[in-house]
Amino acid sequence: MADTPHKVDPIGERYFRPLEVAEAVADGLFYVSAALSLAVPLVSQQDYPSLYALAQILFALSVIALFAVTLAVRLYFSPRAQFRRFQDFLAHAFGKPLAAQQTSGYYNNAATTAPRRIAAQVLENSFYSHDTVAQMARIERIKIVVYVLLYVLVIFNRNTDLATIAVAAQIVFSEQIVSRWFRLEWLRRECERTYDDVYRQFQTKGQLDAFAIEAVGRYEIAKATAAISLSSRIFNKSTSRTDAEWAEIRAALGL
């Protein structure tokens, strides 16, 4: 069985940790704005004018803050982190350091040409990504079931007015809940397909020159389209198991 060196990832700490914090802030603001959107209609403007005005102001501020943080995640934190990760990928593939921060213990293979190294690295990335996303998807499915059940209860509650039902629908079918789940499941499938295709190419000893570029492009496009950050907690928790499995895969393919 091939050895798996100790992994050191300065890129994750320097670039992906701020991204995780920003996404956590965005999620928190989403739930705050969602709670306020449900609470505001319950406050009587005639009976409690000051409280009503305060609730409206807080709701508006939470929506603006959510917009600003989400925009920062999409246009700054995420592209910056993904670029550094891809930069590290290329540095290992071509043996040319492109930045001061480089990972260590990743992308260990015996490939002697750049196309073969690229293909091997895509295989490694898609293997670990699929495992992490699959675990994230299981958790997300439980959340979706809970959200949908709560929404059904709201709908069938005779005391619930149409405005509340509409707000609840807007929350449940928002980008942070149902849309996120669909994107997560799609990313899981794309990682699985990429892994299967690259593995099959190695097994059949196919031509890797153009295929390797196609594979890395497909993998990076899938990540960008899904806009899902993989859980570092799940990744790190599963490392001992996934490292052992990856070592067996490398040995089987002669990598």
Image (tube, grey):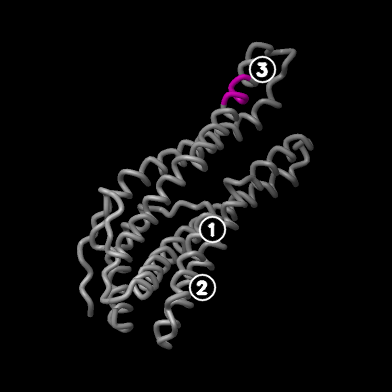
Q: Residue at x 36, y 68 (%)?
A: 121
Q: Is 234 left or right of 6, judged from the image as shown?
A: right
Q: Secondary structure at mark 1?
A: helix
| Residue 14 location (% of width, % of height) | 31, 43
Mark 2, other Cα within 10 Å: few <14 / some 14–19 / many ≥20:
some
Contact, mark 3 vs mark 1 (Cβ under 8 Å): no
Q: Along the polypeptide, which appears first: circle 2 or circle 3? A: 3
Q: Residue 53's quadrant in the figure?
A: top right
Q: Residue at x 62, y 52 (%)?
A: 178
Q: Residue 39's quadrant in the figure?
A: top right
Q: Which residue is mark 2?
A: 193
| Residue 69 location (% of width, % of height) | 51, 34
> What residue type is disc 2 on?
Arg
Give the number of the mark in front: 2 or 3: 2
Q: Is residue 200 above or below residue 225?
A: below
Q: Which residue is mark 1?
A: 184
Q: Residue at x 44, y 76 (%)?
A: 198
Give the main secondary structure of the magenta stretch. helix
| Residue 15 location (% of width, % of height) | 36, 44
Q: Marks 3 and 1, Cα distance to the nearest angstrom?
A: 38 Å
| Residue 216 location (% of width, % of height) | 45, 66
Q: Along the polypeptide, which appears first: circle 2 or circle 1? A: 1
Q: Is 52 left or right of 132, judged from the image as shown?
A: right
Q: Secondary structure at mark 2?
A: helix
> What residue type is disc 1 on?
Leu
Q: Which residue is mark 3?
A: 52
Give the number of the mark in front: 3 or 1: 1
Provide the residue span drawn in magenta: 57-61
State which quarter of the image contains the N terminus: bottom left
Q: Is 133 contained in the magenta span?
A: no
Contact, mark 2 vs mark 3 (Cβ under 8 Å): no
Q: Secondary structure at mark 3?
A: helix
